[in-house]
Image (cartoon, helix red, strand yellow):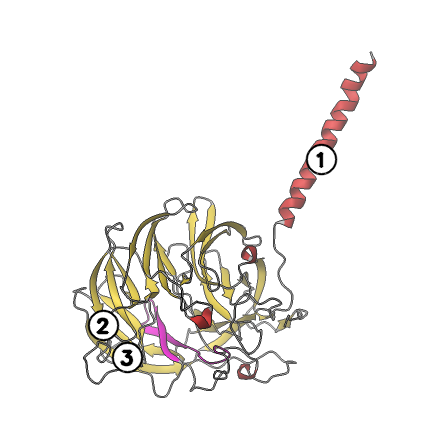
Amino acid sequence: MFNRLFSAFVRPLQTGLWIAIAVALFAWQTAASANPIPAGSAMSRLKAIGYSDLQGRGGAFKLAIRRVGERWYLYMGHLWHSGWTILDVTNPNDPKFVKFIAGPENTWTIQMEFHDNIMVTALARKAPVWGGDAGKPFEEGLLIWDISDPVNWKQLSHWKTGSTGVHRVGYPGGKYANLAARVAGYRGQILVFLDISDPANPKEAGRWWMPGQKEGEEPARSDISFHGPAIISEDGKTAYLGYGPAVVILDISDIASPKPVGQLNLSPPFGGLVAHDVLPIPGRNMLYVHGEATGGGDEPNGALACSSPLTISAMIDIKDPKKPRLVSVFPEPSPPKGLPYDNFCDKGGRYGPHNTNLEYHLPDVQKQGDLVYITYFNAGLRVYDIKDARRPKEAGWFIPPTPTKRYGPLPYDKLVTQTEDVLVDTRGNIYITDKQWGLFVLRDTGSGHAASKRTPVARAAP
């Protein structure tokens, strides 16, 4: 009789208690899986909604995103680690680590591009200043992957330059990828078009370089290099690129023999890595062009930030593609009030533009409109309104906190934030990477020019 009563009343209570404990434990584990957003950011209009420490692999770099069914996968290369990380950002407030795909040792794997089910990842010798070992072997060239399974990539081929490798790669889909490649017989990086229509057997389809880059050409030029990528028009007949000191427009109707259409030289007066890349503004006959700031703790006892001429961030009118012309220069960012420096040149590390949201050929990336997102190293992410191309104005910004841990050797002078890359998805989530942090996920508050806000400052490690 007692056993029947126990079974009828006590055991269900025990079962319910264990279920309640299990549910609570699962909820606690789920909540605990989110990395807390580091304290100390400064912001206007933008706010941080999520963060991932990438399982301790600080220093992520190039970003790409893909929606598969109901899941959103973010892919990224790394500055200090050889390989690629996959995050699940279906819930942008809680980016979840999925996988790290190891790359070859002593090799830069910072750049990647994909379209549909084909991923291309660049390989290049890692310079000692970035942590490479000049006495050890490295891999170079381009890896081509099948990513029809978004998590378990399958390598299809490895194309090699025969030199030190590929820095940046562009692949908007279709038959051709374009590479910023170091090729034997040339000074600096040149533009190479690679036919990947058979991804298991890629073949060079064409190349273009500036006069003086090829060995034997006079006058010899060792000050010119193509950074990449080339941005290809929808009809596949035109390439827009920042190349060395200039904005260049090429006719690529015959991919084997690209022909110059127009060119705008930017140096002098601008300095740094002058024409890093360009961003066409759809439907407006405009290009956004920016350089890459140099100096600022990039080498031991090297040049200070802002020691070279101003790095360009500007709008170019290409209504007449034969005669591109400069129409405006972006205003320089200013630090928040109350800091011990009046301009970012005095903050430490590099200061100036670096990367923008170039991936809008991807279906899950926000299409280019009136806002330009540009990373500015120690000034974080800056957002500019270009509705009036002649009067660009700053619309918002986000500066990650001072790092608390050093993951890589740069910058040498001070441990400060160095925001590197940015991508914006079609849901409005903004992803940024940094030399000494993981991944921040931001949102635009949509409140216009909101008042600056600053959270408590995190303490920096030596």
Image location (x, y in percent) of residue 50: 58, 58
The image quadrant of residue 397 is: bottom right
- Whole-angstrom CA distance, mark 1 to mark 3, is 68 Å
Question: Of the residues tagged 1 and 3, which is closer to the observer?
Answer: 1
Question: Which amino acid, mark 1?
Answer: Ala
Q: Which mark is residue 185?
A: 2
How far is disc 3 from disc 2 in space, using C-alphas?
31 Å
Residue 23 location, quadrant: top right
Which of discs 1 and 2 lies nearer the camera? The answer is 2
In the foreground, 458 or 314: 458
Membership of 290 in magenta stretch? yes
Mark earlier in primary sequence (1, 2): 1
Residue 61 visible in rendering: yes
| Residue that sits furthest to the top in the current view | 1
Residue that mark 1 sits on: 20
Q: Secondary structure at mark 2?
A: loop
Along the horizontal axis of the image, is 96 left or right of 365?
right
Q: Which residues are magenta?
A: 273-299
Nearest the eye: 183 or 376 = 183
Which quarter of the rendered picture does the C terminus lie within?
bottom right
For the residues bearing labels 1 and 2, Cβ distance under 8 angstroms: no
Q: Pointer 2: residues within 10 angstroms few (<14), some, or many (20+)? A: few
Q: Which mark is residue 72?
A: none
**Residue 131 belongs to the span the image colors magenta:** no
Q: Which residue is mark 3?
A: 324
Residue 240 placement (x, y as % from top left): 28, 70
Please determine whether, in this image, residue 60 is positioned above or below residue 339.
above
| Above or below, 76 relative to 339 | above
Amino acid marked by disc 3: Pro
> Could you classify mark 3 by the number of other residues whose Cα lies within 10 Å: few (under 14), some (14-19), or many (20 or more)?
many
